[in-house]
Amino acid sequence: MHSFGYRANALLTFAVTILAFMCAIASFSDNFSNQTPSAQIQILNINWFQKQPHGNDEVSLTLNITADLQSLFTWNTKQVFAFVAAEYKTSKNSLNQVSLWDAIIPEIEHAKFWIQISNKYRFIDQGHNLRGKDFNLTLHWHVMPKTGKMFADKIVMSGYRLPDAYR
């Protein structure tokens, strides 16, 4: 007959195999969810736009962020990390991204929000490239599941322009 150790090993192996199979099915089921997030960002005010003493441009904005990220939540979603970034081009870099605001959304109840804030992080360009610059505001999100791979997406909102002169 088989020893106790052999039987315990067979039972544990079977249990881990079933658990791995269930986790794979849970991760695969996220592919069938209909995700239709929406967002709108308005610049209410440019609080200041100045050149720092060492030559870098700095901007402070008051933003109105409205978003509905509830469709990102499924039974397998642990949390969603969302952030707003200003994106623009310069002669040195084809893409510059500056994070202005971020939040961790732990539950579906908090995934539909409206906030009015000044940028949480400093909007600074290394140089003096921001005067008269066109830029996009992009809402990025990363969905962190309980099991399976994390995925990310974004909504790009264009048509924003900084002033031609410092204020």
Image (spheres, rainbow, N blue to C red):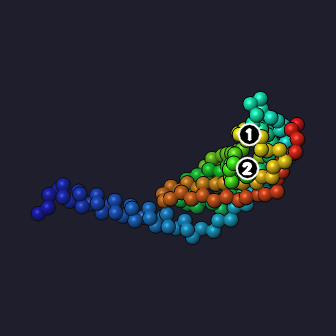
Q: Is residue 66 visible?
A: no
> Dot 1, how many residues are within 10 Å of its Cα: few (below 14), some (14-19), or many (20+)?
some
Q: What is the secondary structure assignment of the residue under circle 2?
A: loop
Q: What is the secondary structure assignment of the residue under circle 1?
A: loop
Residue receiving disc 2: 90
x, y percent for residue 67: 74, 55
x, y percent for residue 21: 40, 65
**Mark sitting on residue 6:** none
Q: Nearer the viewer, residue 132 or 77?
A: 132
Residue receiving disc 1: 127
x, y percent for residue 43: 83, 48
| Residue at the left extreme of this rendering | 1
Residue at 73% in and 50% down: 90
Task: Please say if the residues under marks 1 and 2 sit with CB atoms less than 8 Å apart.
Answer: yes
Indicate the amino acid at tag 1.
Gly
* First-in-chain label (1 vs 2): 2
Q: Nearer the viewer, residue 18 or 81?
A: 81
Q: Image height check: is 72 above or below 123?
A: below
x, y percent for residue 106: 61, 49
Q: Is residue 138 visible?
A: yes
Q: Image height check: is 94 above or below 32?
A: above
Q: Specify the quadrant of the image occupied by residue 12.
A: bottom left
The reply, left or right, for residue 66 in relation to residue 79 is: right
Q: Image height check: is 57 above or below 25?
A: above
